[in-house]
Image (cartoon, rainbow, N blue to C red):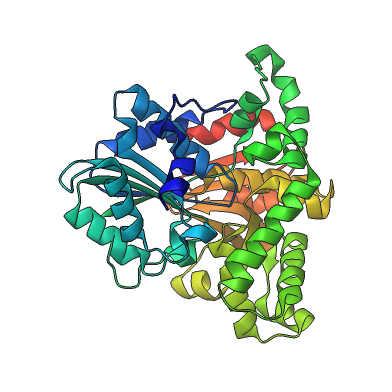
Amino acid sequence: MKDLLYQYNPWWEEAFKNVNVNPREKYLAELRRYLELKQIVILTGLRRVGKTTLMKLIIEEQIAAGIEPSRILYVSLDDYLLRKNNIIEIINEFRKVHKIKIEEKIYLFLDEITYKAEFQVQLKNLYDFQNSKIFAASASASMLRDKKASLTGRAITLEIKPLDLDEYLYFKGITLKKRDQQLYKSHFLEYCRVGGLPENVLNPNREYLMNLVDDIIQKDITAFHAIKNHQIVRDYFTLLMERSGKQLSINKIGKILDISPDTAKRYLGFFESTYLIHLLPRWGKTNQKLLSAKKIYVSDLGIKYMFLGEKDLGSYFENYIYLLLRNRKVLYYLYEGATEIDFITEDKILIEAKFYAKLDKRQEKLFQEYPADKKLLIDSVEMLEHLNEI
């Protein structure tokens, strides 16, 4: 194990510098703030969204700030050579290699944390009994679920999302001034084709996205949940992409795939837990929120484009606005009298997305008459900045 740990941690023997990496400052700023807290920091989000890169950037900054490199351990726990070792054994070997006492502080960066059984209990023991600052990462919300509440009060979870349009432009080295606002539309259309996964932004490749989706379906869904029929899961995801931005009927999905509604609902939860999709409930009374069909949005527009191409660009714009608002506001869709408005927030802000188009008559009537505290019609990429007002 010693030799493997040296391979993962080149800074133990030489100067360390992340090469050709664009920092995501909004997340780095938050991670720097968490360094001052004792709690374990868990990074989660879609696979290949940049969780490992962020951990390596924090490692570089800590070394530059004077932390002894030998006190910092990074390891990916899905490594086949570590399959027989639990987390505590790996940390003990790390301390032994560098002769670090239990009371001496170490910095742990544990990637793919959910590959280790009972990782929550082991993290709890590290938190309670060793002087350590712990960062951990996983691409699955369902695997992170802490059924025994071992980490309650001991952990902070930070979801890392795909690049938004501004970050995309930064990664591409594009700077637009106010006088160039008319160019935002063409850049947004390109963003729809490429999506916001950092590696794919720098080197766009359809095969990269296909492999990503296959990886998630195979590793995080079919293998983890012991689903024998892999093809049904792939067909299900294709159906979800075709219905993105629309209300989703579990019963119809079940009939198409010849599976029960309960199975269709369970599989839908698996897709959501891996951050491939997000679900938006309907606004209304509690039973309407719980029982009505949910709308489906894709976590990365590049994945959506891979399945749909340039069909219905308005749905991409709506999807993007959802992604901008998600986690900032408690969101629902409004549906009354067979007429739909894209979003309503829990604090009564009504939002409709139109991609260089106008409301139809029924939508306009509902939009104008519905009692909301604030109303926003976002009908162009240039108007996205108005979302910062809410």
Q: In the picture shown, does residue 382 fall above or below 209?
A: above
Residue at 70% x, 72% y is 233
Q: In the picture shown, does residue 326 fall above or below 169?
A: below
Q: Is residue 325 visible?
A: yes
- In this rendering, would 254 be left or right of 281? right
Q: In the picture shown, does residue 7 fall above or below 345?
A: above
On the image, which quarter does residue 175 sit in? Answer: top right
Label total for image: 0
Residue at 56% x, 76% y is 225
On the image, which quarter does residue 270 sit in? Answer: bottom right
Residue 32 x/y as whole percent: 34, 33
Q: Is residue 78 visible?
A: no
Out of 300 and 225, give the one closest to the viewer.
225
Out of 217 and 317, give the one closest to the viewer.
217
Residue at 78% x, 61% y is 242
Residue 258 x/y as whole percent: 76, 85
- In this rendering, would 216 be left or right of 137? right
Out of 145 and 386, give the one closest to the viewer.
145
Q: In the picture shown, does residue 104 fall above or below 128?
A: above
Residue at 48% x, 61% y is 141
On the image, which quarter does residue 269 sit in? Answer: bottom right
Residue 61 x/y as whole percent: 39, 27
